[in-house]
Each structure stands twice: as C-alpha cells, then as structure tokens.
Image: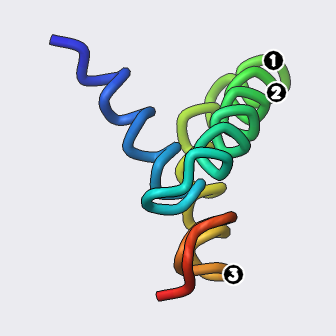
Amino acid sequence: MAENAIIDAFVIVIIGGMGSFPGSLLAAVLVAFVQVFGTYYFPDFALAAMYLLMLLVLVVRPGGLLGKEA
C-alpha cells in the first residue's frame, strides 16, 4: 500500500548502515535534501538522484555511512 515509503526507508537504512540509528538519521537528512534539491533543480532526475546517492555510498563505504564495514 505504501511502496514509496517502504522503498525510501530501505534506501535510508542502506545508506545509514544496518543497525546504526545515528547513521539512519543522517541518511534521512541526506535523502530528504537530495529529493528536495533534485525536485527543484532537476525534476526529471529527482528519483534517480536518491539511487545515485545510495550507489555512491555503497561504492565508497559498503557498510553504510556510520555502519560497520562489510
């Protein structure tokens, strides 16, 4: 029923790091900023920007921003 919210929550947890509450808070702020910035400046690519952020974090830190390294 709320697939957009579930997908957003999944992306936030992956970016923040599994099991890291402060990481999830930081990731939520980053995802919100990217969504608002993308919607305002690049409306056609706003959804893709969130996934590009997730890809960038997974390439640089596979365990998430504040999670344990894989």
Badge 3: residue crowd in 10 Å (few <14, some 14–19, many ≥20) = few
| CB under 8 Å between discs 2 and 3 | no
Q: Is residue 22 left or right of residue 37?
A: left
Element type at mark 2 = helix
Q: Measured along the vertical axis of the image, is residue 31 above or below residue 67?
A: above
User: In the figure, residue 39 lies in which quadrant?
Assistant: top right
C-alpha span from label 2 to label 3: 22 Å
Spot the residue most to the left: 1
| CB under 8 Å between discs 1 and 3 | no
Tally of numbered tags: 3
Residue 10's x, y, as percent?
38, 44
| CB under 8 Å between discs 2 and 1 | yes
Residue 8's x, y, as percent?
44, 33
Please give the residue where the numbered disc 3 appears in the rendered image: 60
Q: Residue 37 carries which label?
A: 2
The kind of residue on which mark 3 rests is Val
Q: Which mark is residue 20?
A: none
Element type at mark 3 = helix
